[in-house]
Image: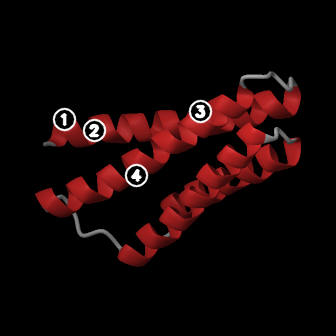
Amino acid sequence: MDIFYSALVFLHMLGLAGIIAGFLMQLMTDHPKSPKVLLHSSLLQFVTGLALVGVAEMADLYDPDHIKVAVKLVIALAIVVLGVLNLRRPAKNLAIIAGVLAIVNIGVAVFWG
């Protein structure tokens, strides 16, 4: 179970890196594929985040703080929605908001007790 959990954490971090990369790609180069990178990475992070909480609950790895999980879930869902909107009609403002929310989500994960 530890290997599976570690693999999920690895994929979760790749999703985060993809969100930041998509945000920076769109901001700096306006590459046409950057909205897809941002959307797919946000979906990866959303799904792996849910899976991480589910595995932690089932395997009794630790007792997750459900309020923190809910806050992170709402932020992650907002990033996914911004990714979808950005894919339909690419705009740098949407990418900036998604990137800032991803950084806020990192802050919640790291600094929330």
Task: Give the quadrant of residue 65.
Answer: bottom left
The residue that label 1 is drawn on is: 3
The residue that label 4 is drawn on is: 49
Residue 113 in view (yes/no): no
Q: Which mark sits nearer the N-terminus, 4 or 3? A: 3
Task: Give the quadrant of residue 105.
Answer: bottom right
Q: Residue 68's spot in the image, x, y percent? A: 45, 72
Which mark, residue 6?
Answer: 2
Q: Amino acid at mark 4?
A: Gly
Q: Secondary structure at mark 2?
A: helix
How far apart are the two marked residues, 2 and 4, measured between alpha carbons?
Answer: 12 Å
- Observer-side mark, 3 or 1, equals 3
Q: Amino acid at mark 3?
A: Gly
Q: Are marks 3 and 1 in contact (CB under 8 Å)?
A: no
- Observer-side mark, 2 or 4, equals 4
Q: Is residue 62 above or below residue 25?
A: below
Q: Secondary structure at mark 1?
A: helix
Q: Amino acid at mark 1?
A: Ile
Q: Is residue 73 above or below residue 50?
A: below
The residue that label 3 is drawn on is: 18
Q: Secondary structure at mark 4?
A: helix
Q: Identify the residue at horizontal 14%, vertical 60% (top origin).
A: 58
Q: Which mark sits nearer the N-terminus, 4 or 1? A: 1
Please count the marks in the image: 4
